[in-house]
Image: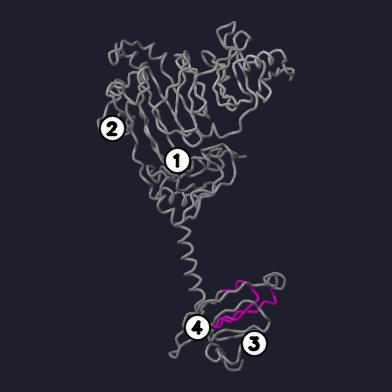
Amino acid sequence: MKILFDSHTHINNDGYSEEERAQLIAAIEDSEVAYVMDVGFDLPSSERAVSDAALLPWCYAFVFASPSWSPFTLYSCVTHGFASVDFDRENNVAGRDLQGNTYTQQQFDSILPTFYYRQLAAEGRFPSEIEGVAVESRDVERTNFMFRTSPGEINRRRPTVYQLLESMPDRIDLEPATDVFRITGEGIEFVDMETNTIDQKKSAAFTKVLRDKGFSFPARVVSGNPSTRKRYDNGYLLVDDALRVYHMKQVRGRPFVRRTDVADSLQIGQIFVTEFADRKSLGFLVDSEKRFYTLGAEDYKLHEIPVGKFGPTRENMMIIGDMFYWTVTIQGAESKRYVAVNARDYSLADEYRPEEKPQAWAEYAKYLFPFELSFTSPLDGYVKPRIAEVSFQALWLGLVLGAFYALAADRPADGSGRPSASSCSDSSSSSRCWYSARQNDDNKPIRKRRADVFDVRPFITRSFPDQVRKINSSGIRIPAISSTPPRPRNPFGPRIITSPESTITINPAKKTSEKTVHQRDGL
């Protein structure tokens, strides 16, 4: 049994010839894949995906997926500007800067020596100094770091218990914690994971030290990294109930607690413990005004990073740093910006905001769809119905078109404002009436419209099919119980009746039968 599903296939790729496309389709049919998703990324590819899905029973179309290409961009300590990895016309990797200069792969390595230091060292091309500072590749390796955060990591359910590692283990490698802790309004409690019991002695020791340092329970923010896959452990950064920031870790089984100099007026709301190889910082902090800071590890001094407003619950951030500069990338739903920060004094070196080009489909969509319904979001990991992108243009356009349709549908067929002379009556009180195809004085048919009302008796058609009245193909559309009358072969021309047909009573005052029904003599 085929159970595999390929969620991203490009049968619609315009790079395929028809022969290659046929070979690909045959290969899919011979494989263990049961279904594939043919992904369209623009209008032509989406049209082709729909065509593929109509012809191939195992193919599903995914239309108007718009991939965004964002080149990898870093700040160069050589050119002192932003440079991006790009592709040339032959689809080969190349480099490009904001001034339009292009670089080969080897040249691009040279203008980003702190990022490509391994390649340069292997080729013997690593510089002996950068910006007048003598450097070695091992210095660069020790000071390089990468930091990422996304709204999905922030907007999720937080655990209520945390692991506290031993920051000074007997061996070189860090060891997993054997207990977890929680902070309540009364203090801190350590729970042994094997026995699920509270370690009263350890809990009392940590609670006492925290209270002696002025900690106000409970904690508003608890941030740490309990992973053992790191070079060292710096414990946790805590924000108490009075908005003061504390540093807590475990050293030889004993509590280590320090109160930082971070002002409580900043109202720190987010903390990210860093634990980078150079041991220069304790973590990154975000205050209530969305300002971004780094906290020094030795002196607990707070330094603001000049990246502007940063909202961790709505924006992604990536920092690629070295001993000279940090390249900070901040991306939200509608904007993206690059900020270069001097790593030595945390001053602003450069800033770049790429021009956002609106997609054509987005412009059309705001007039077609009044809102967007989705079940997932890049801002969190929850699956639930969400309404977003409400478009008042589409709402107003829908109202105008709806009013126009209502007026057009209510207008009589002859434009007189009175019921049509061809209106029929139904003695059986059917709730549906069909207009006849009237003829003018030249005996030429005049096309009429259908007047529909809700049919209250569709079940009769299913229950008594033999009792459903027939439709005379002569041009008179007689009311029938059936909700979907058969279409006449020639609705506007006469037809000679060759066999008896049953009809309902026609309003004799209108005399429509005299003009539209033709019978052969003798019948």
* Label 2: element kind: loop
Instruction: Please say if the residues under marks 4 and 2 sit with CB atoms less than 8 Å apart.
Output: no
Could you classify mark 1 by the number of other residues whose Cα lies within 10 Å: few (under 14), some (14-19), or many (20 or more)? few
Q: Which residues are magenta?
A: 465-486
Which picture quadrant has residue 209?
Answer: top right
- The residue shown at (38%, 14%) is 140
| Labelled disc at residue 417 | 4
Give the residue pinned by disc 2: 98
Label 3 Cα neighbours within 10 Å, binned few <14 / some 14-19 / many ≥20: few
- Circle 3 residue: 505
* Left-right relation of 229 to 208: left
Q: CA distance from mark 2 to mark 3?
A: 83 Å
Q: CA distance from mark 1 to mark 3?
A: 66 Å
Of the two numbered discs 1 and 4 on the same chain, state the one appearing first in sequence. Answer: 1
- Residue 405 coordinates in the image, percent (x, y): 49, 70
Could you tell me the amino acid type at mark 4? Gly
Marks 1 and 3 in Cβ contact (< 8 Å) = no
Q: Earlier in the sequence, mark 1 or mark 3?
A: 1
Q: How far is the residue under mark 1 from the one under mark 4?
A: 54 Å
Q: Quadrant of the N terminus?
A: top right
Closer to the chain start, of discs 4 and 3, is 4
Q: Earlier in the sequence, mark 2 or mark 3?
A: 2
Q: How many marks?
A: 4
400 or 464, which lies in front? 400
Mark 4 vs mark 2: which is more N-terminal?
A: 2
Say above or below: 380 vs 399: above
